[in-house]
Image: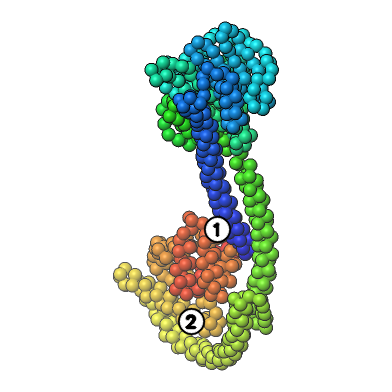
Amino acid sequence: MPLRLVLVVLFVLQILIAVGLTGWLSLRNGEKAIKDLATQLRSKTSTQVTDHLADQLRLPHQINQLNLDAIKVGSLNLQDFDRLGRTFYRQMQIFKVGYINFANPEGEFIGVERLADGAIVINETRRPSLSSLFIYKTDEQGNRVKLETILSVEAPVYEEGWYADAAKAQKPLWSAIYPWDDKPEVLSISSSYPIYTPQNQLLGVIGVDLILSDLGLFLQKIQPNPAGKIFIIERSGLLVASSASEPPFILRAGKAERMAAFQSRDPLIKATIDYLTRHFSTLAHIQSVHQLSFAMAEQQQFVQVTPWKDDHGLDWLVVVAVPESDFMEEINANTRTTILLCLLSLASAILLGLLTSRWFSQRIQHLVMVSQEIANGNFDQMIEVQGIRELGNLSQSLNQMAIRLKSAFTELEDRVAHRTAELVEAKTAAESASLAKSKFLEAMSHELRTPLNAILGATQVLQRDSSLTAEHQERLKIMHRNGNYLLALINDLLEIAKIDGSQPPPASNRFDLELRLKSETRPQTDEQVIDQQLVGCLARMSPEWTAQLHQAAIKGFDQEIFQLVTQIPIDCDLLATSLTTWVRDFQFDKVTDLIQQLMDARFES
């Protein structure tokens, strides 16, 4: 693998790992921050709602208690409806409530109402017109100034829930949430206090109404985001108020019917109440604060449900639902920014890696070229690398190696020249000795052939003697045959002396027939079989591979031979094993001999 690619890959890999871990940790921290923020937001919103409920629902009891104390001390006469109207009017100016009223068992009624435009009117029903409700405009002191309208009353006031429930319970309580008869679009809840004489005789019921639409406006005001929802429900599942734009009731034939949460047209409110019902089986099981989450339309929704109770019978649930997408916009933007920065960092790393690797590779390539020149015998090369200490040290080492190699090769050439001169001198002496040997062999062969010819002649004469036995004849034949054999040996010695050290002539048929038959029928040895197998395996290799092996064996390059051995097929394992063993034992001559056998075999074929 090229050094440039290695440097780029390693550099980019490090940057990629670092940037990837940073992005992953950033995303994880972002998700954790989202959950923490959603938890804090739900808790804060729920606390705001419960605190508001406590403050607002405490006012009716405080107003009722003030009026009850005034009645007890005699400062407020229940028979004086004019004074009651002015008192209720001043209380309406001080306290932000929707309605303050009083009714007696005879069906008489007086109430002070705050209209939608902020104006305050007095509603009154007196004997003998108990079936009519008179509505008066008032001045700034609460005095009646004008009869605005007269409405028909369908049922006596003591049958209404705010009156009848308190009279029956004989204690202060909250009425059920109810719509007004003359304004069905208004839902309210009344804090009702029954009033008794010391003899425990019912004098009437005073009440203060809270308009639930005001509670809905408050929920819309504190709603954390447009996609989230806040709603209050009773344990029965009926809506009390919500931050949605829809009212918590349904108008049917001009009459208001309270709406259950699962009937809401708001998808988040409907999905949340469905989830709470499935999760808790029934809303009555929710007795503590719960923070939950569920999926709606493939998006996560965070929910907190908080029970809220008071001392007068209210038992509501405050639910805050916030979609995860409201928090993910900023996180997604940060994620996109992180990804873009990661890509820019990666591109910068690749570019910087390419430039760095190019700078390194150019200097290392220069070192490689100079080292190749030194390997080819050009020892006058000098290397100079600046900027990197390690490469500078390497260049100095190569320069010192070139100087030492040049000195070693010069010394080797001198030794070779000296050894060559010695060999020439030894060759001259050897030639002189060989000439003397030849002359000696010529003289000796003459001296040996003279008596040997006499012996051969005598055996021929004796063979013609018919008086000899067959056994003697056979022995004479053997003597004559061996004599001829000995004469052939002497002639061969003489021929060797004449060719002065050249290859001896091949064996002829002058040997004894029995000896030749034995030699030809003798089976091949194991070494001959192995040599034939090695030559066969070597013949399967390419000529270029054989030439490289030959050059490496001549130069004694063991590592190059080991590298060539790895290219030998698996079925020629014998050749690979033999070459490895010879090279490890520095027997390079066996390698050259094996190649020579292959060349001889090819030449003969």
Q: Which residue is mark 1?
A: 540
* Residue drawn at x 33%, y 72% as measured from the top left: 475
As shown in the figure, which amino acid type bears the numbered disc 1? Answer: Arg
- Image coords of residue 364 (percent x, y): 64, 71
Q: Nearer the viewer, residue 321 or 111?
A: 111
Left or right of residue 130, residue 164 in this image: left
- Image coords of residue 592 (percent x, y): 53, 71
Q: Nearer the viewer, residue 248 or 458?
A: 248
How packed mark 2 is, by other alpha carbons closer than 10 Å (few <14, some 14-19, many 20 or more), is some
Q: CA distance from mark 2 to mark 1?
A: 42 Å
Label drawn at residue 72:
none
* Residue drawn at x 46%, y 59% as measured from the top left: 573
Q: Residues at badges 2 and 1 in contact (C-beta under 8 Å)?
A: no
Q: Is residue 344 visible?
A: yes
Could you tell me which secondary element the residue under label 2 belongs to?
Answer: helix
Q: Is residue 586 above or below residue 400?
A: above
Q: Which residue is mark 2?
A: 493
Q: Is residue 255 above or below residue 493?
A: above
* Residue drawn at x 40%, y 63% as measured from the top left: 526
How packed mark 1 is, by other alpha carbons closer than 10 Å (few <14, some 14-19, many 20 or more), is few
The tag earlier along the polypeptide, 2 or 1, is 2
* Residue drawn at x 61%, y 17% as measured from the top left: 123
As shown in the figure, which amino acid type bears the numbered disc 2? Answer: Leu
Here the colouring is rainbow
Left or right of residue 276, residue 377 in this image: right
Q: How many marks?
A: 2
Q: Residue 548: which quarter of the image? A: bottom right
Q: Quadrant of the C terminus?
A: bottom right
- Image coords of residue 175 (percent x, y): 49, 20
**Going by the picture, which residue comes out furthest to the front?**
74
Q: Is residue 429 above or below residue 202?
A: below
| Mark 2 or 1, closer to the camera | 1
